[in-house]
Each structure stands twice: as structure tokens, then as C-alpha cells.
Amino acid sequence: MTWTFSPEHVGTPDATALRRDYYDDVASRYWRRPATAAEIDEGLTNDGVELLTPPTGQFLVGRYEGKPAACGGVLLLDEERAELTRVFLRHAFRGTGGAGALMGRLEDSARALGARRMVLNTRLDLREARALYTRHGYVEIPAYCEGPYMDIWYGKEL
């Protein structure tokens, strides 16, 4: 059983499907009901993913035994910091080692873009994500940005 990760444009069919699943997952948990297709479309409209390509960022798709199963991005915020974003593993592939492998590849991508520190923001209800970040050495930091879906901020030296 193997994971592979590769940079991929956010508009490919696999990347688009993963981004839709990511948004459905986080929005449905936030609203405590299933997100509609229209809500997912609205949430993905003008969400800034076009910046997740060099030189401003990178988007990765993870495949487990060839099946699209995970995604994540890094976005350069300045000369030293990259932001971790859109980290997602489809539920059927959790527990297979993909999350840790994805984190490592995203950190490698940030380093390749010149970042020396990774930061991220998330919500308190996303317990699995918060556990993943702390398992990989991220520690709580002061807020570096603000928004309606941000409860806690993490950082890590790369």
C-alpha cells in the first residue's frame, strides 16, 4: 500500500473533486448539517486557490494506490512564512499513514519556495486536524490573520 504525492493544478478533475470534498467536510461540520452543492460552489468561488502555484504557492494531490485521496496547499505569505491550507484526507483513507506523509511533502514544498516557517489557522471543532498539526510539531501562536472561521493559529520552524 503506497502513497504518492504530486503538484497538481487546482483545476484538474481530481484536485477539483478533492477541494469540493474538503469544503463539504469543513462546511458541513461547521453548519452541523450537510452542505448543499450550491453552498459548496459558492464557498469555492474566488477562494484564492489560483495562488497555490509557484512562485506564490503549491497544491499537492495525494493518491493511495493510484486513487485520489488527499490534498493540501502552501501559500507564501512573505519571504519567510508559508501558510498551510486546504489539508484534507478523504475519510475512507484515514488511518493509512497519508496525513503524516502529506504534511511532510507540504513542508518540503514550502521549503522549496523559500519559506523557513509554516503557519496555519483552523477551527476548534476540527479536532482531528488540530491533533495532526500538534503531532507534527506545530505549536499555538498569536493570530497572524483574522476571519470568521479562525479560532486558533499554529506555527512551526521548517
Image (spheres, helix red, strand yellow):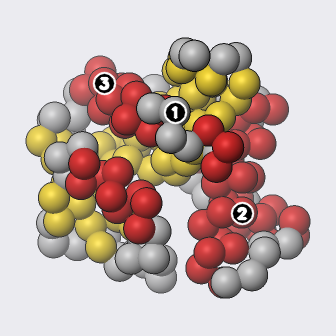
| Marks 1 and 2 close (CB-CB < 8 Å) | no
Q: In this view, does 152 lie above or below 154?
A: below
Instruction: Identify which amino acid the numbered label 1 is placed on.
Output: Thr
* Mark sitting on residue 33: none
**Closer to the observer: label 2 or label 3?**
2
Q: Earlier in the sequence, mark 1 or mark 3?
A: 1
Instruction: Identify which amino acid the numbered label 3 is placed on.
Output: Asp
- x 41%, y 67%: residue: 127
**Which residue matches tag 3?**
108
**Which residue matches tag 2?**
24
**Position of residue 28 in the picture relative to residue 88 (left or right):** right
**Closer to the observer: label 1 or label 3?**
1
Asked whether the viewer can see residue 6, the reply is no
Pick out the residue farthest to the left.
Answer: 157
Q: Earlier in the sequence, mark 1 or mark 2?
A: 2
| Marks 2 and 3 close (CB-CB < 8 Å) | no
Badge 1 local density, few (<14 within 10 Å), some, or many (20+)? few
- x 62%, y 75%: residue: 29
**Position of residue 139 in the picture relative to residue 99 (left or right):** left
Instruction: Identify which amino acid the numbered label 2 is placed on.
Output: Asp
* Residue 88 in the image, given as x and y percentages of width and height: 55, 47
The answer to which of 46 and 151 lies nearer the viewer is 151
The answer to which of 93 and 76 lies nearer the viewer is 93
**Which residue matches tag 1?**
96
Badge 3 local density, few (<14 within 10 Å), some, or many (20+)? some
**SS at mark 3?**
helix
